[in-house]
């Protein structure tokens, strides 16, 4: 069986690759991938060097990708929950950018019949958004700030609205993403560089929001979250970042904030719940996957090099790029 994939032989190098593979064994499910999603922020940090690979447990060379959707091709002899032909998503730590993906049974999830696979493939970013909201532990009527209105931010906004949080305040430096945040249901949308508007907002909310979620992964975004949180409020950092950060400790200390990290692989039960909830919210139309009809690419060597060249440059003109494998 021929496996076709994206391949990273070394830092900053991406290419098309082929290799022969074997049938799955044990508790492994082999998925015939239809779609795999590039997670631009995380894959940039892993593509540049192997410093952030501590979360993967690997280094170069390897096949990247952790979000795939497709149909079960074959199962190992100990698999009991899935059979060939089932529509599924697979959440491997890496290896999803290929036409065949090996995934352990407990990281495979059935896709509801009324959910399209090219929408379901956003599950990993959707899971991150829902995991972060769950970690913040907010109740109906509480306020939340979401810093960063990319895919994770847009899904977090929709989920916050579905959970009755208000006001929902979204921040992004890009006008296009601010407009997307409005469409997703944010009550207030601001440029994080508009300090006058931010101070007016904090005053209007009597000291800030109940929880501020940074999904930008940037140091300014983290400090903005600390600044936006009310006294005794919460701050949640959700992006994979292994670099030293400078945080405004004085403000964090004076306001007696609770600061939480939420690396999803440290709480597997919460992670699994978030994935299932994302698929359910998609099926009930309470969440809509980000627009992607014009960002689906054939996994040719030319497209792979083009897309990862843009990932390397943090080029956000390639919003939501998806490889179509069959």
Image (cartoon, rainbow, N blue to C red):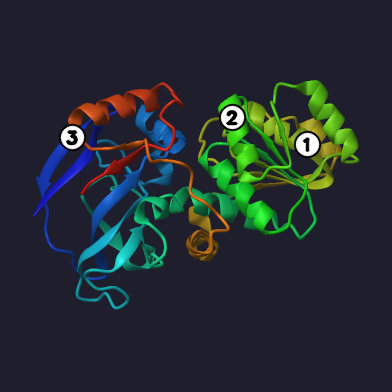
Q: Quadrant of the N terminus?
A: bottom left
Q: Which residue was labeled with disc 3? A: 16
The residue carrying pointer 2 sits among few (fewer than 14), some (14 to 19) or many (20 or more) residues within 10 Å by Cα, namely some
Q: Is residue 114 left or right of residue 232?
A: left
Q: Residue at x 57, y 43 (%)?
A: 154
- Which of 274 and 46 lies nearest the eye of the viewer? 274
Q: Which residue was labeled with disc 1? A: 228
Q: CA distance from mark 2 to mark 1?
A: 15 Å
Residue 169, image quadrant: top right
Residue 124 at x, y percent in the picture: 45, 51
Label 1 element class: helix
Q: Mark 2 and 3 residues: CB-CB less than 8 Å, in contact?
A: no
Residue 215 at x, y percent in the picture: 59, 39
Label 3 element class: strand
Residue 115 at x, y percent in the picture: 41, 60
Residue 54, image quadrant: top left
Q: CA distance from mark 2 to mark 3?
A: 31 Å
Q: Which mark is residue 218?
A: 2
């Amino acid at each position: 069986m021929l496996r076709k994939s994206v391949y990273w032989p070394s830092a900053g190098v991406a290419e098309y690759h082929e290799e022969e593979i074997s049938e799955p064994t044990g508790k492994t499910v082999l998925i015939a991938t239809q779609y795999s999603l590039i997670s631009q922020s995380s894959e940039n940090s892993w593509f540049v060097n192997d410093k952030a690979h501590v979360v993967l447990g690997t280094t170069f060379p390897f096949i990247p990708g952790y979000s795939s959707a497709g149909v079960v091709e074959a199962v190992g002899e100990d698999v009991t929950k899935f059979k060939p032909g089932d529509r599924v998503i697979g959440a491997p730590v890496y290896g999803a950018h290929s036409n065949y993906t090996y995934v352990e049974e407990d990281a495979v999830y059935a896709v509801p019949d009324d959910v399209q696979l090219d929408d379901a493939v956003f599950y990993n970013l959707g899971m991150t958004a829902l995991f972060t909201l769950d970690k913040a532990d907010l109740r109906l009527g509480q306020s939340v700030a979401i810093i960063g209105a990319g895919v994770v931010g847009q899904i977090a906004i929709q989920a916050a609205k579905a959970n009755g949080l208000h006001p929902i305040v979204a921040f992004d430096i890009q006008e296009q993403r601010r407009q997307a945040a409005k469409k997703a249901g944010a009550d207030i949308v601001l440029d994080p560089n508009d300090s006058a508007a931010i101070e007016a907002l904090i005053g209007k909310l009597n000291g800030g929001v109940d929880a501020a979620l940074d999904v930008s992964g940037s140091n300014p975004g983290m400090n903005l979250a600390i600044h936006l949180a009310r006294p005794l409020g919460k701050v949640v950092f959700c992006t994979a970042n292994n670099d030293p950060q400078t945080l405004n400790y004085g403000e964090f200390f004076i306001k007696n904030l609770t600061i939480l990290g939420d690396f999803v692989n440290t709480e597997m039960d919460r992670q699994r719940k978030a994935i299932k909830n994302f698929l359910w919210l998609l099926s009930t139309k309470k969440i809509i996957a980000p627009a992607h009809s014009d960002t689906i690419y054939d996994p040719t060597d030319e497209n792979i090099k083009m897309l990862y060249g843009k990932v390397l440059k943090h080029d956000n003109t390639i919003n939501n790029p998806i490889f179509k494998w069959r």
